[in-house]
Amino acid sequence: MKTLKSTRFNLVWGLAFLLAMGCTDLEENPDFTTQGNFFNTAEQLELGVNAVYDGIGYGTQWFNHFYNRYVFESRVGYQVGWEKGPLDFQNGNVNPNDDYINAYWTISYDHINRANSIIQKADELKEEGVPNAALVDRVKAEAMFLRAFYYFNLVRYFDDIPVTTTRTESDQDLPSNENGKQIALDLIISDLTMAASVLPESYDGANTGRATKWAALALLVKGYLQAEQWDNARTTAETIVNESGITLFENFADNFAVATENTGERLFEAQVSGGTNASEAQNAHQHYVPGDLPNNLGGVGWHWLNGTQAYRNRFDPEDKRIQGTFIDEYPTTRLGTNADGELPMVKWSGDAPYNLSRFGGMVSADADPNNPEDLVFSNAWSAKYTEVGIENATLSEKNTVYLRLADVLLGHSEAANESGTGDAFFGINLVRERAGLEPLAGLSQEELRDAIVNERILEFGFECEIYPELKRKSTFGGSPDYLGDYIQEFIDTYNVDRTLSARDYVLPIPLNEVLGNPNVTQNPLY
């Protein structure tokens, strides 16, 4: 059920534009809606925080928050694409003027500024003794969670970022990024700790999709891991496991099914509805769906992104996550009809020819539509955010999942392993049990560290988690170097014209930010 309404207050957030409008010809004084005169009640403040949620979904930009991260993921090389953005990243061609980096940065800071506004106004309303103070507190906690969410997903990619906790109103308020990574992590941990103490454990149907206590604690686990605060990460994960009553779905695919949205282990997700807004499907379903899937079954012909054959071949054939991660078969329009007058079904093959070109993993155009041995493809098409069978590609209803229990469990294993306290096998073995894999035991700290990283790679494909997680665990030229090893394997496997470099371990701050904010210094690698 998608019930959280993401109302956009263009008049409120576009105050400067309003004040610039001339009024000399009007006989009456206009009653402008401004930041100061609109949020005067708890209910109005609640509407305001809805606009802060906008950035996690489709939002207002073609390259939305999650799609930009899709593009960043291509830097690792487990997913690739022929559209310019993914192609540049998989080939290592990343620069400060990149459209996707700029869009991601803009979306993030626009919504951080909105969150700052809500937090400031909430404090003012509490001082004024506004009725329904409990709602004001909850809305403030939601804004703090969202501010932490945006900052966390900036610091993972850019390291030293500018941090501000007040509404930016002029060029005198522009923050510095000196020591920005540490400042951001401190704020993230502080915000999430406070949010978790206020947010409810769940909501009624009218508020489905809002941040809960468990979402705040799950993101806090990730913040502690990023800051290498192992004991705090472990104990926070244990709080979720022991007190939430939330358990893993028996079926891995339920993490992405429409029928199970906003339930179970799905701790935080963006509400997406192509039926309500056709544009919402463009940067998920339509970018991953096979290009030769019939249009009346959800095809569209874009297929900008897919997993490599090598990535899918990493999975144990008995791994139950395969069904929820990849498309196994579909009817193709590439060959015409077969002897029965029907479109032939093509099936995945780990041995079929594959290359990185646009059509390099699709069924051969010369295949015999009546010969099953010819009807194979080797692209690892993603099933997580695609819906084969919908009557129109714009009608995808799959939400975008940002936080789920499996991440908490793997975080617990990592924190326990690194700190030497607690049961380091507990979390990873629950994840593996759901996948139908044998439990781990008797591994050294180094061996378990490797196993946890590998489990993340298999568990979170196409969820925009692999690049930042490998980045977090790696340093160029260091040991272990999970990110460098993975990128080099991709280069060697597919003969990519690219050389591993320190730039692969961080994204550049957008050129517009560096030119427009004298307090921001570009990452020295760029």
Image (cartoon, helix red, strand yellow):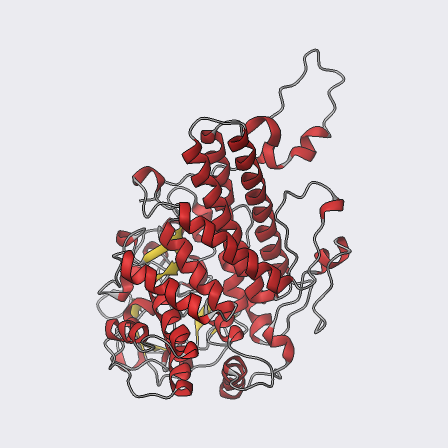
Count all numbered tags in the image, as a single digit.
Answer: 0
Viewer-proximal residue among 24 and 363: 24
| Image quadrant in which the C terminus is located | bottom right
Viewer-proximal residue among 460 and 244: 244
Image coordinates for residue 244, horizontal then vertical, percent: 29, 56
Res 182 visible: yes
Which residue is at 52% across, 88% downward?
A: 492
Answer with left or right where residue 113 lies relative to residue 212. right
Which residue is at 70% across, 53% downward?
A: 175
Image coordinates for residue 300, horizontal then vertical, percent: 42, 58
Res 402 visible: no
Answer with left or right where residue 99 lies relative to residue 221. right
Image coordinates for residue 379, horizontal then vertical, percent: 40, 75
Viewer-proximal residue among 346 and 12: 12
Where 66 sits versus 423, above or below?
A: above
Which residue is at 64% across, 75% downward?
A: 503
Where 124 sits versus 466, above or below?
A: above
Q: Tell me where residue 29 sits by quadrant.
A: top right
Where 197 sits versus 291, above or below?
A: above
Which residue is at 65% across, 63% downward?
A: 98
| Image quadrant in which the N terminus is located | top left
Answer with left or right where residue 106 lies relative to residue 519. left
Image coordinates for residue 100, horizontal then vertical, percent: 60, 60
